[in-house]
Image (tube, grey):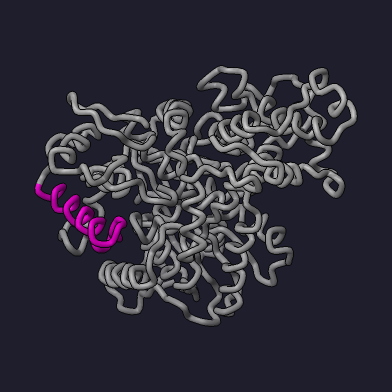
Amino acid sequence: MKTLDKKTIEKGLKVLNTHDNGKLLTHLNSCVHCGLCAKSCIYYRAMPEARFIPATKVDLVASIYRRYSTTSGKIFPALTGARKLDDKTAGEMVDLLFGACTMCGRCTVHCSIGVDISYVVRKGREMLAEMNMIPETLQKTVDAALQTGNNMGISDTDFTETLEWLEEDLQFELDDENAKIPLNEKGKNILYTLNPREPKFFPLSISAMARVFYAAGESWTLSTKMYDVTNYAYYTGNMKEAAIIAQRLYDEMHNLEAEKCVLAECGHGSRAFRWEGPNYIQKEYPFDVITSVELMLQYLKDGRIKVDPQKNPDRITLHDPCNLVRSGGVLKQQREIMKLCTMDFVEMNPCGNDNLCCGGGGGQLAMSEYNERRMKIAELKAEQIKATGAKIVVTPCHNCVDQLLQINGAFKLGIQIKTVAEIVADAIVLNENKTS
Amino acid sequence: MPTLEIENNVFEVDGDGFLANPEIWNKDVARLIAKYDGIGEMSEKHWAIVNVIRKNYEEKGMAPMIRTICKETGVRLREIYELFPLGPARGACRVAGLPKPDGCV
């Protein structure tokens, strides 16, 4: 491993500057080491070693703060558990903050005194980003987004041809040549976004959403220039890059003069753009941002789409994406949709705000070096799913979908994994809607 | 470097089990990885998909779009997910000896 020079260390320490950041100061100084967070954490539960306890991760960052920013830590580092930011400490930070945390925030909710543990972990990641120590496997995805406009490096031609292909198929299935997947159209009500894995490998969810828009008679468009709902810089902690990516979607909303930005089913993407984006780019949005899950429920409530739950007869359960539910507030909408669109909906235990992460969050899916841990923590989710007896697991997050696909294979669950749009699209009754 | 052992053959792989050296790939390697993933016998359709992916990788350095796979093989979209239960990326691309694609896969 490379040796950290003084300048690099200073860059990392700058993130811990608490002069104008009271929140950071509070959360670095508040942990009372009660240990309640241990059992909240899927890493500790799957691998009960002290280093995986969330409080240990907080202390790793806080110990550096004490060493450089408190009098007692400067004079008596050993007595205060203060640590120097050196190669060894930075190496541990990479291993624990990138390699052993999905930033799911369950520990934060359980903390007895309200320490925002995942916030401290992110500050640690920001330090590592400043020190140029982001795992290469994770940074590659950000680089692809920065260089090509989407995180899978899909060319404009490939993207356009894929949408044309999907549109042809949609028209055939609906037997209506007016069924469209509009591209780069100005002045529409909605600019819809996608996770690049949809056009690249899993386009059924695009077709499903196009069917929902068709049934609702929505005025919408996609953009060739900026359709990527993801922002992997949220994971890496490089806030400058996070701002560049958020700014692009902001600009495209402006270019296409759309009223509303609708985010595809993507946990971290909706968190990054909807809730954190204005902070990244330091300005308020002059347009509305909502998730497709909320929009679909609105269609159902307003009677803009009609559904028949008997079209989804199998037992279905929901997996809650941490960034959309625990940290994003979209909790009830997908449940109401399931009740309207399916016959046999059951909850996992625990679920909702207390749900367990699938194990793929925090950028874990991209960092293959930590794959063994990722599949170990996944066992908890596999057991939860098994206990429901569900044949289909629905989740409004493409990142979770991929992790669940792997869980399905590794633990031989024999289930199907679908997005919310796929369930709604399967339940839609078109003729009734047309005559109403 | 992690390794993957299948029927006494040892391959250097990344943490996700994708070949570390895509150039060592051949049809026997494909058969072994497929077997490891629980795909019993590689059918004609399996091969058609794998060959299109491999060709695209050798020519363009990346996995093809799912549209290209469907168009060039004639295999229906939904059937691809049945043939490779781990999906086109972690399933088919891995059997075709590609490095892991970036993004949420």
Q: Residue at x 26, y 45 (%)?
A: B22
Q: Which residues are magenta?
A: B44-69
| Image-quadrant location for residue A355 | top right
Q: Residue at x 44, y 61 (%)?
A: A306
Question: Relative to A376, is A183 above or below?
Answer: below
Instruction: Give the image location of residue A56, x and y in percent.
Output: 67, 25
Instruction: Give the image location of residue B53, x and y in percent.
Output: 23, 54
Q: Residue at x 13, y 43 (%)?
A: B27
Question: Relative to A210, is A100 above or below?
Answer: above
Query: Between B98 and A308, which is closer to the camera in this rendering?
Result: B98
Q: Is residue B61 magenta?
A: yes
Magenta highlight: main SS: helix
Q: Which quarter of the figure is the C terminus of chain A placed in? A: bottom left
Q: Could one spot residue A300 in this view of the protein? A: no
**Residue extending furthest bottom?**
A186
Classify residue A314 as left or right of residue B104: left
Classify residue A131 as left or right of residue A198: right
Instruction: Give the image location of residue A245, x and y in percent.
Output: 58, 62
Classify residue A282 as left or right of residue A430: right
How many numbered dots are placed on residues in this image? 0
Query: Between A354 and A285, which is closer to the camera in this rendering?
Result: A285
Q: Residue at x 57, y 22 (%)?
A: A44
Q: Is residue B88 magenta?
A: no
Q: Could one spot residue A246 in this view of the protein? A: yes
Instruction: Give the image location of residue A410, x and y in percent.
Output: 34, 30
Question: Relative to A413, is A364 above or below?
Answer: below
**Residue extending furthest left?**
B44
